[in-house]
Image (cartoon, rainbow, N blue to C red):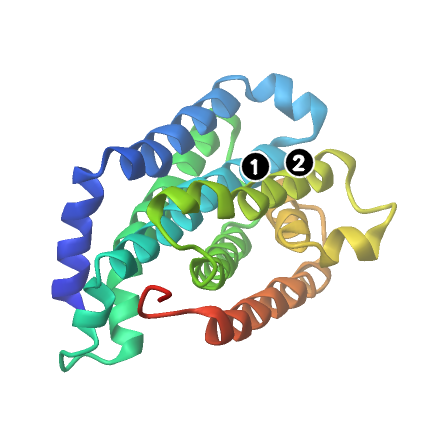
Amino acid sequence: MLPIAFGELIQIFRNRLVLVTGLIIPVAVSALFVRQHETFAAIGSLGYIAAIVMFTVAAFGLYTTAVTTLASRRQNLFLKRLRSTAEGDTGILAGLLLPATAIALVQVTAILTVLAAITGEPGNVVLLAVAVLATLAMMIGLALATAGLTNSPEHAQVTTLPVSLGVIGVATWVGTTGTADLTVLKRLLPGGAATELTVNAWNGGVALSESLILLAPTLAWIVVAVLLANRLFRWEPRR
């Protein structure tokens, strides 16, 4: 797995498209939110800024990069060749997705650390870490499912838009309006419960038991994404 991951890390820094969508765009957008934190905090809260930063990195830095990577490796038959090695399917996918996941985790951690240094520490750091990890896991699952519908790296620019823009839209909606109205709908949408959990973790003032319940919808989306991935993911190009 590690040799695959190391090789994939090199490819990420060689691919300009992945470098821009996976590194530059998320950092640039997040920097804007952090720099203008007073303006955005007035719209929602500091927790909203944390949530939107997290989903910007997760959607573009992780999800889009993962789908593009898997589609590219399938198109050039690299996936097929890897399956002829001693590495199992799980190890192959883990190796291919580990670099993008690690980069996304570092990005989120660094940006939220800067935000905390400027505005003050979050109310519950452990709960915030749980929210970040659950969100990244959900986006990895959705990436595997979307990759099954993506024929090429170019096609990934189209197939990733609904999910990437959708989760950011949901995060914005929930982060700015809360869940007092349309509670069930907002929490069941992908990213809705994770956004509320992040807002609660950063702003504080919510009982831990009430916040932990919000993990359930995100975990459910992970299960759904994995089931879809098992059904849709392909190791070879369509004939």
Residue drawn at x 80%, y 54% as measured from the top left: 185
Q: Which residue is mark 1?
A: 52
Using a 10 Å C-alpha cutoff, classify the residue at mark 2 as few (fewer than 14 neighbours), some (14 to 19) or many (20 or more).
Answer: many
Q: Nearer the viewer, residue 131 or 87?
A: 87
Q: CA distance from mark 2 to mark 1?
A: 7 Å
Q: Residue at x 44, y 50 (%)?
A: 63
SS of the residue under disc 1: helix
> As displayed, is residue 190 above or below residue 203?
below
| Residue 135 versus residue 119 in the image, above or below | below
Residue 137 locus on image (x, y percent):
46, 61
Residue 60 in the image: state x and y as whole percent: 44, 40
Mark number displayed over residue 86:
none
- Residue 25 rendering spot, x and y as whole percentages: 40, 29
The quadrant where residue 39 appears: top right
Report if the CB atoms under discs 2 and 1 are less than 8 Å apart. Answer: yes
Name the quarter where the N terminus is drawn: bottom left
Amino acid under disc 1? Ile
In the rendered image, which residue does mark 2 sit on?
A: 172
Q: Residue furthest front?
A: 239
Instruction: Say which of 129 and 136 sits in front.
Output: 136
Residue at the image point whose x is 48% and y is 20% from the top: 32
Q: Residue at x 22, y 38 (%)?
A: 15
Tell me the quadrant of the picture where the C terminus can be found: bottom left
- Amino acid at pointer 2: Thr
In this rendering, would 229 be left or right of 207? left
Q: Residues within 10 Å of mark 1 (few under 14, many from 20)?
A: many
Q: Secondary structure at mark 2?
A: helix
Give the left or right position of residue 202, taking residue 106 as reference. Answer: right
Q: Earlier in the sequence, mark 2 or mark 1?
A: 1
